[in-house]
Image (cartoon, rainbow, N blue to C red):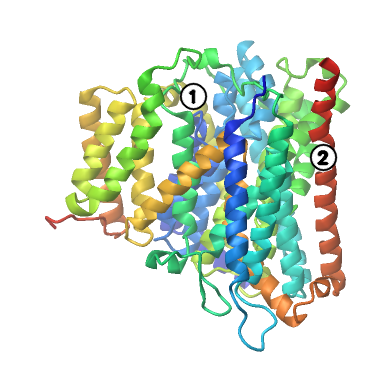
Amino acid sequence: MTTVNRLDLVISILFTLVGGYVLAGALQMKAMPGMAVGPGLFPSVTGAAMLLLGLVMLVQTWLKRNVLPPQEPLYDASVNGDDEPETLIDRLYNPLLLLAILAVILFMPVLGFLITGTIFVVAMVLLGGGSWLQAIIFGLIMTGLTYALFVYGLRVPVPAGLWG
Amino acid sequence: MNAFVEALSLVFNLETLLVILASAIFGLFVGALPGLTATMATALLVPLTFYMAPIPAIAAIIASTAMAITAGDLPGTLLRIPGTPASAAYVEDSYRMAQKGQAGLAIGIGVIGSVLGGLFGFVFLMFTAPALAKFALGFSSFEYFWLAVLGLSCAALISSGGVAKGGLSLLLGLLIAQVGVDPLTGTPRFTFGVSELTGGISFIPAMIGMFALAEVMRTGRRFRLGVPQANVRNPFKGVLACLWKYRKNQIRGSVIGSLIGALPGVGGDLAAWVTYSLAKKTSKTPELFGKGHPEGLVEAGATNNAALSSSWIPAMVFGIPGDAVTAIAVGVLVMKGMEPGPQLLTSNPQNFYAVMLVFVIANILMLPLGYIAARSARRIFEVPRALLNAAILLFCIVGSYSINNTMFGVTIMLALGVIAFFLEKSGFAIAPIILGIVLGPLVEQNFTTSMIITNGNVLGLFERPISAVLGIATIAVWSLFIFGSVKKTFRPKEIAGETL
């Protein structure tokens, strides 16, 4: 049975395509009249190199299709409990984390830092396996401290929201 | 002499000293926590440095990095989880020592050895940097172009993942650096009509996303800390006797660390691995290595911080950082108007001496803080991961927002964090991307200037003697790695063929 490292395959294809796109775009950038070089010179070099190395990686991925990647752990997983079976919430942690940040990007300008930040921290603590009490106390303290540090300590404004 | 006195006043004031202390404690906390790296500590600090004066800003980075790297020995010794790639070189020995009830000795060797190594690196930096700066004053765009390319090439090629992945990481960084208005003609490049991209992609949200967000995603929810198997009662007991016994290793580790760390683009991680294997090869008892023997620990531990200090040589003298941390520091220097390069040492020597003094203070601070950290290691490990991740993520958001006061920075942080997560999962190194982002404008500017001078003739890049040497060295390095990579790619296939 043929096994290909799918992530490597996808990444190498993406790099090849991006390299090709950058090269094509760079070649269309014209130099100013009377100048030997233009704005497309450096992008064309990097684009061509990316296209080439993307193809090299693609070939390498294909050549290594039956070679299993080394499975040497950096540390003893059993020491840290990492050898326990993965649960559904473990698998959903990263997608939910990203969704939470997206929600912050959308709602922080409207609701302001204090409200959005507190809700975000509470959600993240709960997602990480903390209790409701822990989440609420930590959410309020952490958001308050961060607000104080940036607004009063560094004099950096944070989003105030529609309520000012 | 006047410059040195001025440097004293720049460092010995309440603001700078408080910043050094706070950053050192922060670095110690982050470095001691498994899964959190020195680079992450630096990345999270940068948004704060944005609002500081130049010397406190750079002091914050130096103090937190030095402390985080030393503190990285704690999880290595007590939990067998190396805090940094460099401490991974001797984690087996330090962990086995802890198992034998010598946790205090192992941590003490790490801390005191790092202090001595760091101070040696400082002396090396102090004496070599001004001489190199005078030499570098004669450099033109040709030499700077090749030096930057050589440094970037070394960083990409020795990174994990091999030639193709290292090269692609670097090219991704260079590509990110090209987004925005072209410096030569003002033509918008790769902005896709998005007005926020016209000003380019700021390296701060990029770096926060790639090092902090990606790191949280990588360690994830399941990262639970075990309770350390050993207690640390007196961290420094017997350390001096041990260091005296292995004084040759201490000196050799410091010297080699300083030399390797000073190479542009190489950084300190490689140095610890080199000296650990050297210690093993030259030891009278090589069979004890990896089983709780302090000899390799002494040598590689000294190398760690010596390399850390001397990796600032290419960063300060040429503006070519050796690793991700110095790349971030170069970014901060540029942001603060302290353009790194020979002029920093010749025109503004007080700033250079001030940075040197910060090195000394940060290294000396390691002794009391390292002692406290070793004693309270258990408490540091007991911090719930759920709270820690939530705090880091909130800081990532505010830090990325605060650079331009727009949510666009947060969007950049999110996008690049996700990209870095998948790239790292596939075996790509992230440091070359950051190096590419920081050095991209310098490489492009010098490349374009040189090409204008030579009227578009590529061979003109080799016409000056030093640039020719650097150019040939760059080509030789690439050829060597490509040859090795081709050999490696075809070797497993032959084996597979034999087994089939």
Residue drawn at x 41%, y 67% is B193
Q: Residue B21: x percent and y percent?
A: 46, 46
Q: Amino acid at mark 1?
A: Arg
Foreground residue among B460 and B464: B460
Residue B144 sits in quarter? bottom right
Foreground residue among B388 and B102: B388
Foreground residue among B297 and B7: B297
Camera-nearest label, 2 or 1: 2
Instruction: Tell me how far mark 2 sits from mark 1, CA to CA.
Output: 49 Å
Q: Circle 2 — which element?
A: helix
Foreground residue among B406 and B126: B406
Identify the residue position indicated by label 2 in the image. B486
- Residue A73: in sight, yes or no? yes
Placement of the N terminus of chain A among the 4 image quadrants: top right
Identify the residue position indicated by label 1 in the image. B375
Q: Residue B403: x percent and y percent?
A: 38, 59
Q: Circle 1 — which element?
A: helix
Label disc, if present, on residue B454 of the rendered structure: none
